[in-house]
Amino acid sequence: MKVAGHQRNRAILSKDTPGPQSGKSIPTSVVVGLTLTIILDTGVQILWKAAASAVPESAGVFEVVIGMLSQPMFYTVIVMFVAQFFVWMKVLARADLSFAQPITALSFVSVCALSSVLLHEHLGPMRLIGIGLILLGTWFISQTSHNTVAGLDDSPTHGMQPVAAMLAEDDQTGSGGSS
């Protein structure tokens, strides 16, 4: 029966599936991945600003492109973007998006801190309050229940088994996902 199949699919997709760790324990691989994501994002933002600052403000679009391509920092930024992409894919394979993404808001804090130190940007009271709220919000999110998967399974479908099982169930029942 179609209703029973959807109930099984909901059970397959629920947070009670075997394998993931529900709760406050965060696997080291997720912590390392989130930390690398924040560090890479911070580096990208600071280097991007430094590279952009080297281009004259009055430059047109063509001059901006040429100016950026002549900056070694631009190529470092590209490499860091690519590295961040792969690290982020690993994090998403092991952690809930609704848990991992808000944790990366810590890069706003690190960018503000380094901008103040390295670029001599002013951190006024409102920015400091904002940083405090980000820290508080990140702490609250870190205390919530979440699904993370420990281990270093590099298979491309890792984390997708519940979805694959749901699709296989739909194919077997002939529902094909239509209502």
Image: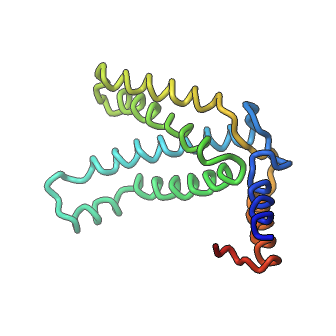
**Residue 71's image quarter?**
bottom left
Report the side of 23 relative to 53 (left or right).
Answer: right
Quadrant holding the N terminus:
bottom right
**Residue 35's image quarter?**
top right
Depth order, front residue of 134/112: 134
Q: Residue furthest top?
A: 125
At 82% across and 49% down in the image, what residue appears? 17
Depth order, front residue of 49/157: 157
Q: Position of residue 68 (x, y in %)?
A: 32, 59
Q: Position of residue 94 (x, y in %)?
A: 72, 49
Q: Residue furthest left?
A: 58
Report the side of 82 relative to 109 (left or right).
Answer: right
Q: Is residue 174 above or below residue 29?
A: below
**Residue 171's image quarter?**
bottom right
At 51% across and 29% down in the image, what residue appears? 137
Quadrant holding the C terminus:
bottom right
Task: Please indicate, yes or no, whether residue 154 appears anywhere in the rendered image.
Answer: no
Q: Residue furthest right?
A: 18
Q: Is residue 1 above or below residue 13?
A: below
- Structure colour scheme: rainbow
Q: Position of residue 32 (x, y in %)?
A: 68, 39
Q: Position of residue 61 (x, y in %)?
A: 22, 65
Report the side of 69 relative to 6 (left or right).
Answer: left
At 33% across and 26% down in the image, what residue appears? 127
At 76% across and 66% down in the image, what residue appears? 166
